[in-house]
Amino acid sequence: MLREFEKEDWQAVLAYQSNPLYLRYYPWTHRTEQDAREFVRRLMAQREEEPRTKCQLAITLAANGQLIGNAGIRRDAPDAQEADIGYELDPDYWGHGYATEVADALLTYGFQTLRLHRIWAQCVAENKGSTHVLEKVGMQQEGRLREQRWMKGRWWDVLLYAILENEWQVRSSS
Ligand SMILES: CC(C)(COP(=O)(O)OP(=O)(O)OC[C@H]1O[C@@H](n2cnc3c(N)ncnc32)[C@H](O)[C@@H]1OP(=O)(O)O)[C@@H](O)C(=O)NCCC(=O)NCCS
């Protein structure tokens, strides 16, 4: 399930963001209570924007409401015809298809509700779980940004993926 963030969610966020598996493709080496509180505050602040351009929501388990990650869709401006998507999950819940389910839902919302023309995403090239998710929802690799990100003492290549509205329509109707 996807829902808005609440202030007290920082504890669940800190718990999973402290997992070394999660931290692997991020610049952070560890996370603190202050980091998690600020992270949640920033995502909650998106609600105040009028009209809203960014929507990063908590992912929870339908069975018990447990917070297991977040995902969102972001436009640069209210009239933008493209947006990017992003997601992250608690490593304890990887490999269940949740990220794919969420990415699919974000594409549907982006094309059907926001009437976007193009949706893109970026991820570290070595992050095979994430590239696999993007490919499973029909996004195509458009480029490789060589040594685009400096983190953890070295350069990392980043892959750019995107899907166009007409490509998504064809997939959705098949
Ligand atoms: C990326 C991430 C969200 C994927 O979440 P997930 O719930 O495991 O994703 P799914 O289960 O929907 O799909 C993952 C797919 O990648 C595959 N996969 C995972 N790790 C892989 C690897 N190292 N090599 C090849 N395939 C891999 C899985 O087998 C699965 O494919 P399948 O359904 O065909 O078996 C999760 O790993 C994560 O949160 N990582 C940390 C944060 C992050 O990197 N976010 C993305 C930033 S771009």
Image (cartoon, rainbow, N blue to C red):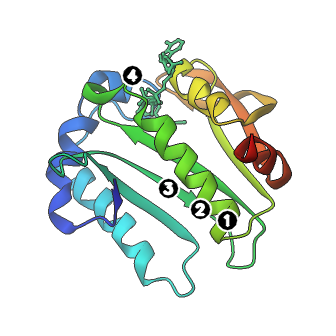
- Looking at marks 1 and 3 on the same chain, the residue that comes earlier in the sequence is marked by 3
Q: Quadrant of the C terminus?
A: top right
- Dot label at residue 95: 4
Q: Is residue 142 left or right of residue 60?
A: right
Direction front: furthest residue = 174
Is the residue marked 4 within 8 Å of ligand 1, measured from its CB?
A: yes
Q: Secondary structure at mark 4?
A: loop
Three-letter code, disc 3: Gly
Residue that appears at 37% across and 35% down: 28
Residue that appears at 45% across and 60% down: 56
Q: Is residue 131 left or right of residue 60?
A: right
Q: Secondary structure at mark 1?
A: helix
- Residue bearing the label numbered 2: 109
In contact (CB < 8 Å): disc 4 and disc 3: no
In contact (CB < 8 Å): disc 2 and disc 1: yes
- Dot label at residue 112: 1
Three-letter code, disc 1: Gln
Q: Secondary structure at mark 3?
A: strand
- Residue bearing the label numbered 3: 72
